[in-house]
Amino acid sequence: MPDAYILGIETSCDETGAAVVRSGQQILSNIVASQIATHQPYGGVVPELASREHLRALIPVVRQALAEAGQTYQSVDAIAVTQGPGLAGALLVGISFAKALVFALEKPLIAVNHLEGHIHAVLLEQRQSGDAELHFPVLALVVSGGHTHLYLAQAHDNLWTYRNVGHTRDDAAGEAFDKVAKLLGLGYPGGPIIDRLAPHGDPLAVKFQIAQIKHRDRRDHKQSLAEKDGPQFDFSYSGIKTAVLRYVETENLKPAIEARRLALAGIGKPTVEAVLRLCDRQTLDLVASFQRTMVNDLVVKTLTAAREYDVQTLFVSGGVAANRELRAAFEREAGMQGLPVFFPSRALSTDNAAMIAAAAFPKFLRREFVAMDFSAEAGMVLR
Ligand code: KG4
Ligand code: ZN
């Protein structure tokens, strides 16, 4: 089979990405233009600003991706673009551009689910390292700013299918990291900052509880058809954010938080050391305890689901999969269960277009192309 060079385009949230990947296994280029600086003053992603930034960044990012890969618009075999889930306006920037390209170039167009992209980020690097053997079923935890989802994945003849066996009932795990960091005046995005601060505090100092969602019984007649053939392993992270807020109030931490917020606003792009100098012991203990609670909950629920569904392989992907403590805990605990666990490298954990081009490759082989009337699906589900 000849090689296929796929140009991937990703604009679902706040990163503008373009990449060229050969046959779902070799990254020739992977360019990401981050919008962090644009959204930082607002402490979260502002959808209108995201669309505007994608419009500004997309063409230079695509040109750079092609140039670094030694490819041209004419030489690539297909264009792949994220269809959803994500911000509707942001998705449309990538989709409109991809449609214009395939119209002009007469190339096939492949629509990719962003969550499937996160899962294929793991596969891409596994293939890249020549470690091709993969045992099914695979359980994939996709844990990011917008999602905390568990999927059972199967593949037959390049057809990948997914069954959702767990999801967050409220906030995603990354959202909880971001909101807690904002609440504590630590800056944005919160995940990477908390990751770096947590080792400086005592993770057992503050006791947090995470809501344990009662899994519906298999024999419960009221359960929906979709849940009929197995239990759900759901997550809930809005409660821990409220618990942190309550701790801040009862311990009277607000004046120190305000002072830190002001100090950091004056620095612009603060280093971890600068943030660390502005944190007292109690704050560092709070941060460490929050992260430990999040990590424990993600690991325990995922490994319980893995045992229940008798899976052979575990994938952990999405922005939060970059977290050091989470990776170490998964490696340790899955290792004790004899379950192989794979993560993307830290660069491929957060949003990027290489994962979109990689997820498109099996669809390319199946000639699963989309017509010009396809559009963005902000709430797209993965099946
Ligand atoms: O996958 P991603 O780039 O975008 C979405 O699809 O949401 O994930 C971004 C999320 C943010 O919430 C960010 O705070 C979190 O991932 N994140 C982390 C780390 N790096 C990014 N959370 C914890 N630890 C990290 N090292
Ligand atoms: Zn993502």
Image (cartoon, rainbow, N blue to C red):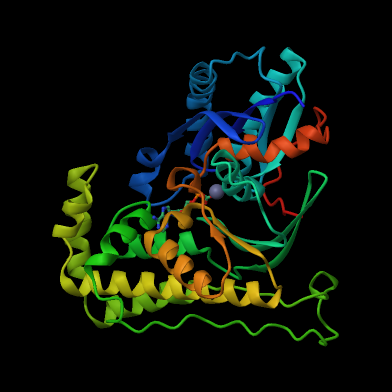
Q: In this view, does 360 lie to the left or right of 258?
A: right
User: Where's residue 3, x and y in %?
Assistant: 70, 25
Q: Is residue 6 above or below residue 89?
A: above
Image quadrant of residue 296?
bottom left
Residue 162 is at least partly visible in this image = yes
Residue 298 is at least partly visible in this image = no
- Looking at the rendered structure, the number of numbered marks drawn on it comes to 0
Q: Nearest the camera: 307 or 290?
A: 307
Q: Which residue is drawn at 49% across and 64% down?
A: 173
Image quadrant of residue 282?
bottom left
Q: Is residue 235 above or below residue 11?
A: below
Q: Is residue 42 above or below residue 147?
A: above
Q: The N terminus is located in which quarter?
A: top right
Q: Residue at x 55, y 19 (%)?
A: 66
Q: The C terminus is located in which quarter?
A: bottom right
User: Where's residue 163, x and y in %?
Assistant: 75, 62
Q: Residue at x 62, y 38 (%)?
A: 356
Q: Nearest the camera: 21 or 232?
A: 21
User: Where's residue 183, x and y in %?
Assistant: 33, 64
User: Where's residue 368, x and y in %?
Assistant: 82, 35
Q: In this view, does 207 lie above or below 354?
A: below
Q: Is residue 64 left or right of residue 124?
A: left
Image quadrant of residue 100?
top right
Q: Is residue 237 left or right of residue 140?
A: left
Q: Residue at x 46, y 47 (%)?
A: 345
